[in-house]
Image (tube, rainbow, N blue to C red):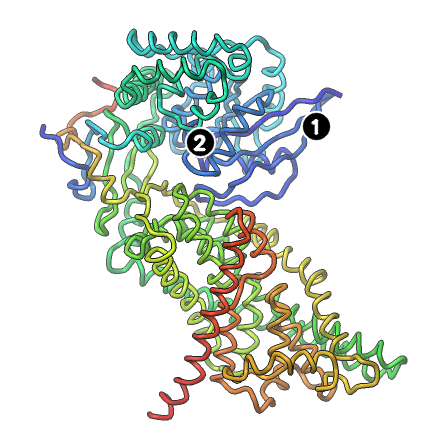
Amino acid sequence: MAALPLLFLSPGAEATVTDVRAGHGMLCRLAAMGIHPDSRVSVVCSDRGSLIVSVAGSRYALSRGMAMKILVNSAGGSIPCRFSK
Amino acid sequence: MKKIRIALAGNPNVGKSTIFNALTGSRQHVGNWPGVTVEKKSGYARLGEYEIEIVDLPGTYSLTAYSLDEVVARDFIVEEKPDVVVHVVDATNFERNLYLTTQLMELGVPLVMALNMADMAEKAGTMINRSSIKKFFEVPVVRTVGSKGEGLDELLRTAILESETSPHHEHAIGYGDAIERSISDLGAAIGSDPALAARYPPRWLAIRLLEGDENVKDKIRDSPAAQKILALLEQSDLDRTEAAMADRRYEVIAALLPQVCTTCVKEMNSSDIIDQVITNRYVGIPIFLALMWGAFQLTFAVATPFMTAIDELFAYCATALAESGAEPAWLMSLLGDGIIGGLGSVIIFLPNIFILLFLLSLLEDSGYLARAAFVMDRLMYAIGLPGKSFIPMLIGFGCNVPAIMATRTIEDKNDRLITILINPFMSCGARLPVFVLLAGVFFPANAGNVVFVLYVLGIVVAIASAWLFRKTLLPGRPAPFLMEMPPYRLPTFFTSVRHMWDRGYMYIRKAGGIILAGALIVWFLATFPYGVEYGSADSYAGMLGHLLQPLFAPLGFDWKIAVALLFGFIAKEIVVGSLGVLYGAGEDEETLSAALLADPSLGPVTAFALMVFVLLYMPCIAALAVIKKETGSWKWALFSVGYGIAVAYILALVIVHTVPVLSGGI
């Protein structure tokens, strides 16, 4: 259950966000877009440095630097539903 | 007649402008990418005894504004206080929209939710319980399908009803004891300035301040209570509070969501596979170039029969005019050389412009546009711009004016300024007639390829200039890339045709207005002073041309081209129009193409240099005005003129002097 940066996930992997270590403007922005602790993300593709992730049905392109600041829990793949706590 | 004002607000790309167009009968541009609307637009609708002003706002993810378009949306809601805010929500992606809902609820504005794209959500099996939303969020909900006009009357009726229901309480999210204490302390301090408290709900203001909203901080700075408020703010740990508040909102959303929507959990779908292919590291850029190349080939192939038909029509008119032998001669010359020669030579190319615009709207409506930005991100980042900047560049293929406006979505000031300054190098539809004419005459077998090369050259010069500006005038690092990728949608033929028409109509209007005027001025200059031979060196045009000609001599352009380039500043099509007028000096049946081919001073190399010059030399008047407006200074507008001329001149010079040497060496 180790936390690792979102950038390290391979395409197709799903995970739960555990922490967003961004400056405070960016934190707010990511939260408004649905990227916040406990949200489920899946990586659509990540072979160009930047990556495309899918969060709650929306798709975002993120730069590598930002993907480093979003920590995820990769073992989260077995959690069946986002709302079970 | 009662008047009310409602605002359409919501996340980007949820269909606000589609609803706006359907309600007001407007034709605002819509597309499938976030950031189509960057300015608020007003329209009117009537229902019963109500006259309703509807304001379409740019999309925003939250009430904390980062970019200029978001500031426009937020300020309108907060400062101008519309009677009702209609929160347009994408029903296919319900959960994400709720964050903004919670913020709008906190603001305490009368709120109505429009559950838009409901048909698509239902098709995907998403069931959203509208009465539960009403129960838990205390917001009336209307099911809408903007593209088909469903539910819009009910939306207006609900909005009217909501505007008359008062008072509105601020629906509160509880943030937990510690934060609530800070909120109430701040709220009390805000309350000590009655003017401030009347303007903004104190609780909302307190929450925004605790979230570190700089823009809101500016709003309280002039208040007598500012000292007290800022001192209180100093005491709290903003970074922690902000994260805790966002968490709390999501807790509330997560708790409520299962009650209103049991099927809102998304699975991976087919766009994943498409995305993996078209954004692939190796084939992403080749796919983009192939699409562009295909577009220009198609532009030629499809337009040719239309062009031939228009050409024949004008040729018929010209012949009829010449054979009628009517008097006076100057009027015949005005009609023949001025209008048919000048305007006709531009109108012939409308089919090309329309087809290009059609293909561009396919690009926008399908969802590929945002992917192209992603594909280019690595390259863009390397030269110092965020990938997002590529979107205004592609919009520039249609027209640079909306493209420069589209830069408002770019958060960083220097990123945005660079994106504005390089935009005129993206070849707009108005330059297409020049390319089609010259490429068709001098490169008949490869016209599509030549035009493709010119467009790519525009992109290359734009990117190289961005790199140069980043290294010299506007240093900095590009803001991190963060952009929504819209879902793929199959564009319908009908909508794409309508988008093509909405944009293409501008070119028709331009042809009847400024281009006609330009052609007439050139005709006037070519005809007078009275008695000189038409279009000769003794006419005003000849004098002007010969005055300018030394400047263009190193490039091999003669005086007629010099005059055409001068007037092309007004609008690039006028370059073609002026050539049409000036080359009309020959025999009556001679077409502009034949006249150009017969001109000894023009060959393939000079023609290519001329096309490159027209591609780059300066923004047209309209683009210049919008650069001035968006950068807020004449300095940058004039800079873009000077820089453009310098780049165009140098490149054209290089082409004229190196290509013959290179090809001679083979």
Closer-to-camera residue (B265/B542): B542
Say whether disc 2 or disc 1 marks the residue closer to the N-terminus: 1
Residue B179 picture quarter: top left
> In the rendered structure, which amino acid carries the disc numbered 2?
Asp
- Residue B34 in the image: state x and y as whole percent: 44, 41
Report in which chain the residue with disc 2 lies.
B
Crowding near the residue tagged with mark 2, few <14, some 14–19, many ≥20 C-alpha atoms within 10 Å:
many
Circles 2 and 1, Cβ within 8 Å, touching? The answer is: no
Location of residue B448 with respect to B374 vertically, above or below: below
Closer-to-camera residue (B490/B70): B70
Location of residue B159 with respect to B185 vertically, above or below: below
Q: Is residue A29 visible?
A: yes
Q: Is residue B423 left or right of residue B278?
A: right
- Residue B408 in the image: state x and y as whole percent: 47, 43
Residue B90, label in figure: 2
Query: Please, what secondary structure does the residue beneath circle 1 have?
Result: strand
- Residue B313 in the image: state x and y as whole percent: 72, 74
Q: Name the quarter where the N terminus of chain A is drawn.
A: top left
Q: Is residue A1 left or right of residue B242?
A: left
Location of residue B406 with respect to B440 vertically, above or below: above
Q: What residue is drawn where x is 69% and y is 82%?
A: B542
Crowding near the residue tagged with mark 1, few <14, some 14–19, many ≥20 C-alpha atoms within 10 Å:
some
Residue position marked by numbered label 1 in the rendering: B46
Direction right: furthest residue: B327
Report in which chain the residue with disc 1 lies.
B
Q: Name the quarter where the C terminus of chain A is drawn.
A: top left
Query: Please, what secondary structure does the residue beneath circle 2 have?
Result: strand
Residue B294 picture quarter: bottom left
Q: What residue is drawn where x is 26% and y is 20%?
A: B240
Q: How many circles with numbers are drawn on the protein?
A: 2
Residue B224, label in figure: none
> In the rendered structure, which amino acid carries the disc numbered 1?
Arg
